[in-house]
Amino acid sequence: MCRMLRVCIALLVIGCGGGSPSGVPTQPATGTPPITTAPIETASIPPTPLPTRLVAAFPTEAFAAITEDPVPADLAAKFQAALALHDVTGGGGMSATVMTSEGTWSGTTGKADGVRDLQVDDQFAIA
């Protein structure tokens, strides 16, 4: 049984290109350099340590605290004033939604189709 196993392994190695039955390396077609079987020496290069970067944990608690209730009126006025600082006099407009633990706010600035004030539920292209 052991002899049969050795014969099978030898045939497998020969069949996979591991050598020729005579032990002589096979030569490539005419005009190409012969195949050499000399061992390839490699330089020992010490591993380079990878840079480490500390990554803060995702603030799950902050997102869990978000509420869809409206923000207080004074905070809504601050958000609207910040949005209105952007110049849209050349046309178009902007819309924003802010969600915090204090509540949610949506606001707009600018004109729809250059005619009427934008509403928070208007649809328009994003550019």
Image (cartoon, grey):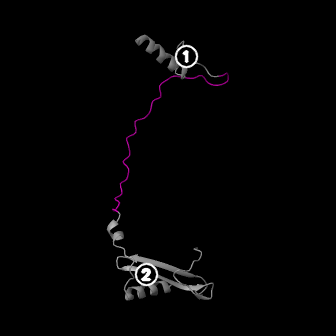
Please give the residue where the numbered disc 1 appears in the rendered image: 20
Residue at the image point whose x is 54% and y is 13% from the top: 21
Q: Position of residue 116 (x, y in %)?
A: 59, 88
Q: Position of residue 8 (x, y in %)?
A: 48, 16
- Looking at the rendered image, the disc whose residue lies closer to the viewer, 2 or 1, is 2
Please give the residue where the numbered disc 2 appears in the rendered image: 105
Which of 56/3 is in front?
Answer: 3
Q: Position of residue 43 (x, y in %)?
A: 42, 35
Q: Is residue 37 magenta?
A: yes
- To which quarter of the image does residue 24 belong? top right
Q: Earlier in the sequence, mark 2 or mark 1?
A: 1
Which of 116/41 is in front?
Answer: 116
- Quarter of the picture containing the N terminus is top left
* Secondary structure of the residue carrying numbered label 2: strand
Residue at the image point whose x is 41% and y is 86% from the top: 76
- To which quarter of the image does residue 123 belong? bottom right
